[in-house]
Amino acid sequence: MSNVVDIRTWKGTDPILRKGDLVIVRDTDDEHILGLGGIVTEVLQRYSEDSEAPGQAATIVIAIPAEEDEWSRFVLPLASVNRRLGLEADALRGYEIDEGCV
């Protein structure tokens, strides 16, 4: 299927954090979720157009897998998470990773 365009190659990485993005919790008072990965399920607040980061998420809701078929939801500020990008994020989204091209 050499004529199929990989959307990851065609579309660049959007700097704006959005619903569906993968994140890792890096800073929070809730120690049991530190270092865990989750998915953004909702953006509650965005920075205004006259800020240093217009349109960027300010407050988000993330879901972290808890037990089988269960997710725990947490409301966090943007500064509490790092966005997961690259091969790890692609693998979590179900993309096939060709190790020979890395």
Image: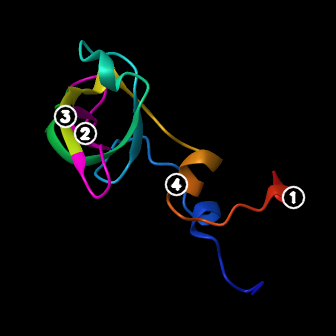
Q: Quadrant of residue 86?
A: top right
- The answer to whether one can see residue 97 in this image is yes
Amino acid carrying mark 1 in the image: Gly
Q: Give x and y (percent) for residue 20.
A: 34, 54
Amino acid carrying mark 4 in the image: Leu
Q: Residues within 10 Å of mark 1 (few under 14, many from 20)?
A: few
Q: Which residues are magenta?
A: 51-71
Relative to 97, 68 lies left or right: left
Q: Give x and y (percent) for residue 19.
A: 28, 51
- The answer to whether one can see residue 49 in this image is no
Q: Give x and y (percent) for residue 59.
A: 18, 31
CA gap between label 3 and label 1 equals 38 Å
Q: Nearer the viewer, mark 1 or mark 2?
A: 1
CA gap between label 4 and label 2 equals 26 Å
CA gap between label 1 and label 2 equals 37 Å
Q: Earlier in the sequence, mark 4 or mark 3?
A: 3
Residue labelled with disc 3: 74
Q: Give x and y (percent) for residue 44.
A: 12, 40
Q: Are marks 1 and 4 in contact (CB under 8 Å)?
A: no
Residue labelled with disc 2: 55
- Element on which disc 3 rests: strand
Residue labelled with disc 1: 100
